[in-house]
Image (cartoon, rainbow, N blue to C red):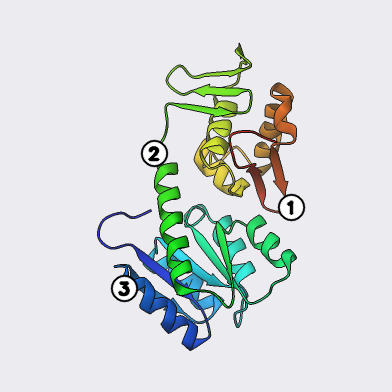
Amino acid sequence: MATAGPRRILIVEDERDILDLVRLYLEKEGYRTLSASSGTDALRMIKSDRPDLIVLDLMLPEMDGLEVCKRLRADPQTAMVPIIMLTAKAEESDTIIGLELGADDYVTKPFSPKALVARVKALFRRMERAQEAPARYAYGPLTMDLARHEVKTDGEEVKLTAKEFGLLEHLLRHRGRVLTREVLLDSVWGYDRDVTTRTVDVHVRRLKQKLPFLNDAILSVKSLGYKLKDGDTPA
């Protein structure tokens, strides 16, 4: 995520009044804004302009927000861009789908522009903390010491291969986020030509065998990839 100069936020919204209102409040806080009125336009702009955050409406012409979100998360170049989804639908199922596809937060219309700005600020703070790689992770009974290249559960060391260790570290670093198989391959394997997305499934299964408590903590997201439950414990 870019940090030099004002952060750039792409607003994807086809209702002009809402777009102008959101833009006004974000720019008052010092953010630079870009705008798109359709899902296809948004994808083009994201590739060319590389925004730091996306405010994405669910109901859009040509391609809806859920499909845009899914495509962004499937592309290693855009997989980590934070997304706040706007939805006029109050049904819980729409929110759940959006979060499962990788949206970081959501706001239901009608909404307070000030509340949206607060969500934006909170999300930036969370992303900054995630980018500061700690020397040690703790998750339930598990501890991971990066400097020692050591993983323990309840104080007992668990031997992991280099790729298993890298996969677990990436899941812990981005807990609560959907990570597609392609993103995990790019981050852990570097897209070695000899490996396929199936390799990720095999290594996730091995992690669960060596660390059984992860069976309920690592969630499989249909047709996308995996997510480690948020928080410090898998419960």
| Amino acid type assigned to the residue bearing label 2 in the image | Glu
| Residue 66 picture quarter | bottom right
Question: Which residue in the rendered view is the most extreme toward the left?
Answer: 5
Are the residues tagged 1 and 2 within 8 Å (C-beta)?
no
Residue 189 appears in the picture as rendered: no
Residue lying at the far bottom of the rendered structure = 16
Report the residue at 30% width, 54% height from top: 3
Q: Quadrant of residue 4?
A: bottom left
Please, is residue 53 above or below residue 214 in the view?
A: below
Seen at 51% across and 79% down, the residue is 13
SS at mark 1 in the image: loop
Q: How far from the left and from the top, in percent, is residue 2?
A: 34, 55
Tell which tag, 1 or 3, sits nearer the viewer. 3
Q: Which residue position is annotated with label 1?
A: 222
Q: Is residue 186 left or right of residue 222?
A: left
Q: Earlier in the sequence, mark 1 or mark 2?
A: 2
Q: Is residue 53 visible?
A: yes
**Looking at the image, which residue sits at the far top?**
156
